[in-house]
């Protein structure tokens, strides 16, 4: 662990979230928090479109939030440019692993032939590995130009990049590593981060990431379904979702409702989990396997991308945003004679909420089916071990009764955790009451800022070096 103060920066398609953290004695403090809209013309499909514009938006948010430190830990995500996977390889020493990963990455990278940054970390399980058993390795790969644009944005914001992390690790750091309660060996948690454009699923056993998956299905799909069903524009549909969106549990049919999501499971953007469990080296039966691609590896020894080496400077080239597959969209028949607004005292409020629920129900059906398939796939690979709880975060987790709905559908206890439960909140830029209301928005930014402030449960703690930019 190290001292100092760090900014955790989480840029989403709808909102920018920042948190400044420092250590005070044995406790981690959140000394500043901030959230602001993401400029849509500067950031699209998880990629930086205009580094200068986005950097200025981040800079303004830092000033507004009272954040003065320049050391930043940020994250990258997006199916089009980032891969995060846990893979299996035969047990070997660090030198053999470094050589193996140069070839192994080619089996798992779906990008076109281009320069990439690759990093990895062997995962030491508490129970160890039996003789002859494969070992788990956490792999992160990102396209070089994607990372370069990200660095250019940080420089435009006046920040000094320390590390570039990936979202599943940041979530686990906040919700699991900083949890004072000791879980029994084998305790398995699925963290489901439901944002605007994507849903990130991370399954953790013994606080170590075991299975990550990204779904191109999230809050924006709910908004588009409301807009299409009720015949309103996107802004109005978003307002309706926030004000009247709710899972009406009393309208769920027994035993398990089918909202029609099954018809879309073969659509582009979703992996097929019906195939047998994959072998360790990405055979064609692996739903995550992709054709062999060439890749340039630059493992840092610290997971995943590390910019801690003094004097290391990366300058980003300009470039157009990468392509991204449009998420699925529900489009039931429009509803006629819809009131322009519904007040809290209006007797038609419940009927209107039912209309909104009818609009989002097909999307919720797709979401729960994809989460179920992910959990079942993990259980199949891990020997049918139980998943003990679901933790819901992200802006869409605020949808009323969503946690109860997932618990009923999946048969696993589900809840929206308090992000600040094990952290001392001293931020003056945001009242404690308001901060707790926005709690589901901050676990990534807090986990990023806490990276050097708490103990790392992974075994790989070697001194790290920055990946060098390719000439």
Image (cartoon, rainbow, N blue to C red):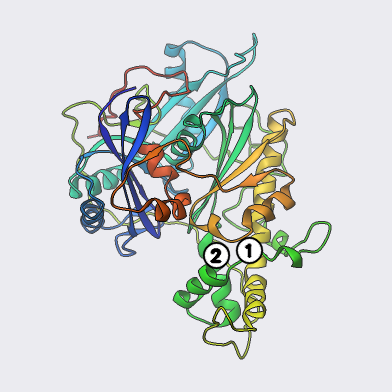
- Depicted 424 relative to depicted 18: above or below: above
| Residue placed furthest toward the top | 131
Is residue 417 toward the left or the right of residue 277 in the image? Answer: left
Q: Where is residue 166 drawn, in percent x and y?
A: 42, 38
Residue highlighted by disc 2: 221
Q: How many marks?
A: 2
Contact? badges 2 and 1 (CB < 8 Å)? yes
Foreground residue among 184 and 168: 184
| Residue placed furthest toward the bottom | 337
Q: Where is residue 40 drawn, in percent x and y?
A: 34, 64
- Depicted 461 relative to depicted 286: above or below: above
Where the N terminus falls, by quadrant? top left
- Depicted 102 relative to depicted 113: above or below: above
Quarter-of-image position of residue 64: bottom left
Number of residues whose C-alpha sits closer than 10 Å to that of mark 2, classed few (under 14), some (14–19) or many (20 or more) = many
Q: Tell me the tag on residue 413.
A: none
Foreground residue among 402 and 462: 402
Q: CA distance from mark 2 to mark 1?
A: 7 Å
Q: Residue at x 32, y 30 (%)?
A: 23
Q: Where is residue 99 drawn, in percent x and y?
A: 43, 18
**Residue 98 visible in the snapshot:** yes
Number of residues whose C-alpha sits closer than 10 Å to that of mark 1, classed few (under 14), some (14–19) or many (20 or more) = many
Is residue 303 toward the left or the right of residue 192 in the image? Answer: left
Foreground residue among 32 and 198: 32
Among numbered discs 2 and 1, the one appearing first in the sequence: 2
Q: Where is residue 143 drawn, in percent x and y?
A: 37, 41
Q: Residue at x 51, y 45 (%)?
A: 418
Mark 1: which secondary structure? helix
Mark 2: which secondary structure? helix
Where the C terminus falls, by quadrant? top left
**Residue 272 visible in the snapshot:** no
Residue highlighted by disc 1: 363
């Amino acid at each position: 662990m190290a001292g100092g103060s760090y900014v955790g920066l989480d840029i989403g398609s709808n909102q920018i979230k920042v948190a400044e953290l420092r250590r005070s004695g044995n406790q981690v403090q959140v000394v500043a928090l901030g959230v602001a809209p993401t400029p849509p013309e500067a950031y699209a499909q998880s990629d930086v479109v205009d580094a200068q514009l986005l950097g200025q938006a981040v800079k303004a948010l830092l000033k507004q939030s009272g954040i003065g430190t320049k050391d930043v830990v940020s994250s990258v995500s997006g199916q089009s440019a980032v891969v995060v996977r846990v893979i299996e390889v035969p047990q070997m020493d660090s030198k053999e692993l470094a050589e193996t990963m140069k070839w192994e990455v080619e089996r798992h990278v779906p990008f076109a032939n281009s320069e990439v940054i690759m990093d990895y970390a062997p995962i030491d399980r508490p129970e160890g590995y039996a003789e002859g058993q494969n070992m788990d390795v956490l792999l992160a790969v990102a396209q070089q130009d994607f990372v370069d644009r990200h660095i250019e944005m940080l420089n435009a914001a006046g920040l000094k990049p320390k590390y570039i992390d990936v979202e599943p690790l940041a979530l686990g750091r906040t919700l699991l590593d900083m949890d004072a309660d000791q879980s029994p060996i084998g305790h398995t948690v699925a963290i489901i981060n439901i944002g605007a454009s994507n849903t990130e699923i991370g399954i953790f056993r013994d606080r170590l990431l075991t299975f990550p998956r990204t779904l191109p299905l999230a809050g924006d799909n709910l908004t588009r379904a409301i807009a299409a069903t009720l015949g309103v524009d996107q802004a109005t549909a978003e307002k309706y979702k926030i004000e009247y969106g709710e899972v009406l549990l009393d309208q769920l049919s027994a035993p398990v409702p089918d909202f029609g999501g099954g018809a879309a499971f073969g659509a582009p953007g979703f992996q097929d989990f019906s195939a047998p469990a994959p072998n360790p080296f990405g055979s064609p039966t692996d739903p995550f396997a992709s054709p062999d691609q060439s890749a340039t590896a630059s493992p840092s020894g610290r997971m995943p991308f590390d910019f801690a080496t003094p004097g290391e400077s990366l300058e980003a080239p300009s470039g157009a945003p990468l392509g991204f597959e449009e998420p699925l969209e529900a489009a039931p028949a429009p509803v006629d004679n819809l009131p322009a607004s519904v007040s809290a005292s209006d007797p038609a409020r419940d009927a209107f909420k039912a209309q909104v629920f009818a609009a989002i129900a097909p999307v919720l059906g797709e979401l729960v089916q994809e989460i179920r398939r992910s959990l079942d796939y993990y259980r199949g690979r891990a020997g049918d071990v139980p998943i003990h709880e679901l933790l819901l975060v992200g802006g869409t987790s605020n949808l009323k009764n969503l946690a109860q709905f997932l618990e009923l559908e999946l048969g696993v206890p589900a809840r929206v955790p308090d992000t600040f439960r094990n952290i001392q909140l001293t931020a003056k830029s945001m009242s404690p009451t308001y901060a707790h209301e926005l709690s589901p928005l901050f676990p990534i930014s807090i986990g990023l800022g806490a990276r050097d402030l708490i103990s790392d449960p992974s075994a790989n703690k070697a001194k790290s070096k920055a990946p060098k930019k390719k000439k």
